[in-house]
Amino acid sequence: MASPQIVWLRRDLRLADHSAFHAAAEAGPVIPVFVLDDDAAGDHANGGAARWWLHHSLESLGKSLGRHRSRIVLRKGDAVEHLVKIADQTGAGCIHAIRHYEPWWQEAESRLGAECDLALYDGNYLMPPGAVTSGSGDPYKIYTPFAKAMREVMPPRDVLDAPETIHAPGEWPEGDDLADWNLLPTKPDWAGGLRDFWRVGEDAAHERLEEWAGEVSDYEDSRNLPSIDGSSRLSPHLHWGEISPAQVWHALKGRRGQGWDTFAGELLWRDYAQNVVCQFPDYARESYRDGYAGLWRNPNRGHVIADELKAWQRGMTGYPIVDAGMRQLWQTGWMHNRVRMIAASFLVKHLLIDWRFGEQWFWDTLVDADYGNNGVNWQWISGTGVDSNMFVRIMAPLTQSAKFDAGDYIREYVPELADLSDDDIHDPPDDKRGDYPAKMIGHKEARERALAAYREAKD
């Protein structure tokens, strides 16, 4: 009998279009392994919402493997140490894994490759980061030329079917019970909104893709309207690898119109973020551009600023569109993309709070919190990124709310304003706010303060 083959799972919780599973199943009996290694990621260990998703995604994949009379071996601790032990105990011939590009996983892959026979495969992105380069052979730093070059080599590779047969090893190594990891909140159980909003797992991802295929043609018009929510909501499924971007691309590539073309750009942005992280591994922790350190107001240096950060986190800024987004985030683990930009801009420009406090809050509360996307998006909005919006371009939340017809969105997530008219709901008059808070700072005052602080920091 062929020696067992280990499949090391991380953010690739699927069976179809999984090159590591495919190669392992062809080589011998398969031992799928997932190691919860919080220490490796440090301040970017999975946050609360992501842990909720991870529990259900592992549970779903475990059921799929059960239909093949297989299972996932769960371990907690140092991933490399556990994998080496399992390989030694089982006599595994090889460890197969999809490449990951977060700095802690890059380090782990290097350590593991020095200890065991490790086979790495591509599969979580349309193209491997660094595969598309400029005329000089350098990786792209700017999105627009990167996206143009990517479109020239699309479509991506063909997708792989799920293995027809996954043979079990003669003896299974010991593993943890998923419930013992306590990934789900209990005291209190704050995940009711997440349960109502999401279905998790590979089957759910493909069901959502099938639904989205009928909606993508309207994406260009509907994507900026929170009340309609023309988003695909595929982001957490892509982040956790319940579906691959190649599967999404091939399913939608025949669609005509601007909607598909615009959505394709979103998939390309996801690849772009990983290209940036590969060039700058600390991008989600450190500003790319110098000269901003004196700009930010630090919540750790004063209770007033700390209270302002807390008000933003809780959706109590007095700006309905911002507060609706922040409350949607808390309730569902997700926020509409247009509103993400508005809420993020408010933190770094209206409140002048360092973008990293926002990045960490999103990291803890988003089910689709992604090291590359989260860091790249926050640095784009703050003006500190390698390719970013200019700091002096300051979003006007009240204008944005009216422009994108966010009234019903606000009514859903800020129910104390639900009875207001369309004329009042974007910027409620003082006598109609009731218990809803007054604005933390006026838009004109905030804009002038931000521009002055920017000029001072640059001088």
Image (cartoon, grey):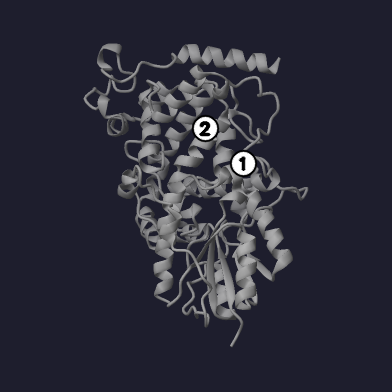
* Whether residue 367 can be seen here: no
Quadrant location, the N terminus? bottom right
Q: As shown in the figure, which amino acid type bears the numbered disc 1?
A: Thr
Front residue of 458/167: it is: 167
Q: As shown in the figure, which amino acid type bears the numbered disc 2?
A: Gly
Residue 358: x and y in percent read 52, 32
Residue 143: quarter of image: top right
Q: Which residue is mark 1?
A: 144
* Whether residue 418 can be seen here: yes
Residue 454: quarter of image: top right
Front residue of 31/294: it is: 31
Residue at left offset 60%, top offset 70%: 86
Q: Secondary structure at mark 1?
A: helix
Counting residues from the start of the chain, the first of labels 2 and 1 encountered is 1
Quadrant location, the C terminus? top right
Residue 67: x and y in percent read 39, 75
Left or right? Give the position of 92 relative to 368: right
Residue positioned most to the bottom: 1
Q: Is residue 126 above or below residue 329?
A: below
Residue at left offset 40%, top offset 57%: 56
Q: Is residue 155 above or below residue 147?
A: below
Q: Secondary structure at mark 2?
A: helix
